[in-house]
Amino acid sequence: MKISIIIPAYNVADYITTCLDSIESQFYQEVEVIIVDDGSSDQTARVVKDYQQSHSLKLILLRQANQGVQVARQKGLEVASGDYVLWMDSDDWLNPNSLQRLNEIACQSTADLICFDYQFVRSDGQIRPSSLHLEELNNESLISCLLNGALNGALWNKLIKREFLMENQIVLPKDLRYGEDLASLFLIALSNPTVSVIRDILYNYYLRPSSVSNTKGTSIYTLSKSLNYVRKLLNAQPEYKQELDLFLYLHLYYYRVVLECDAQVRSYFKDEWKKQNISMKKNPLFYRFIMKLSLKEKIKFFKYLLLIARK
């Protein structure tokens, strides 16, 4: 079995060698690595070319004008030849023997999508484990697990069968800058992949201070575009309406209005939530969510409601 690892790269000259070293050092070697340089202005392409010349890792370098991570991922997929695809971030790295473990599960289960655990690594070296509840995948649909947060909305800890992507004509949504992974996973989930789970920590997600996912900047305002994309995908799935409404409430209102410190961000997402025209009053999942909050979180939530009521 062959694995194609696709790595979009943008201005990561200082980090991408660590990523590549973690792949080359794997015991499992049936791998091709496809790096798509997304118009980097630093020495990313030079670092990759030097790596090609001095290492035995099968490495393909593609270059394009800056078009974003989704276009880069899709371009890598179009030239991939592996049985399975793994989209990695260019500043992350694999744990030893991760690919061997993935190969074992892929051969045993023949699943279309294999989810595995990961950990966050801060720039100061501190490690924080994920908070996934992967066991729920055995009892709930993939869509439900994405909606309720049991499964994280990232592509980089999912190994996906390339044949499944091709047969279902999966084309990753473009023009999404924040929440693009989540939108892509809902698109994949609608094609009903068979799923397998590995609870081993195989992946290290580096919390680089300057990375797009770790700094909000103006890209946070494009989150609503990704969430609207998800809503359109699931509008024809009425069985998920309550879960979807709560999902939208949490991502557009609770996290971005109730918990947000930036007044401009709060104002923007308050308006975005109003545009959804969703009422949570008769949604039992909303009240279950409130009951699960800690005392401190409940106090903050109801303080905010009182503040709104007084205005």
Image (cartoon, grey):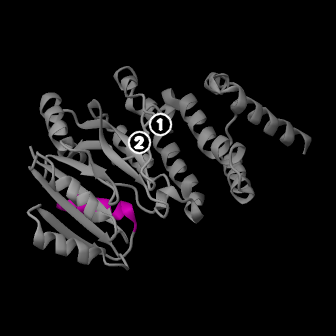
Residue 307 visible in this rendered orientation of the protein? yes
**Residue 244 vertical position relative to residue 60 in the rendered view, above or below:** above
Residue 33's spot in the image, x, y percent?
18, 59
Residue annotated with mark 2 = 186
Amino acid type at mark 1: Ala
- The residue depicted at 70 percent of the width and 32 percent of the height is 297
- Secondary structure that dominates the magenta span: helix
x then y, percent, for residue 229 = 49, 50
Numbered mark located on residue 236 in the image = 1
Residue 201 sits in quarter:
top left
In this rendering, the label closer to the viewer, 2 or 1: 2
Please tell me which residue is depicted at 55% across the width and 54% down the height of the picture. Answer: 223
**Mark 1 Cα within 10 Å, few/some/many (few <14, many 20+)?**
few
- Identify the magenta region: 68-79
Looking at the rendered structure, the secondary structure element under dot 1 is: loop
x then y, percent, for residue 164: 22, 42
The picture quadrant where one finds residue 57 is: bottom left
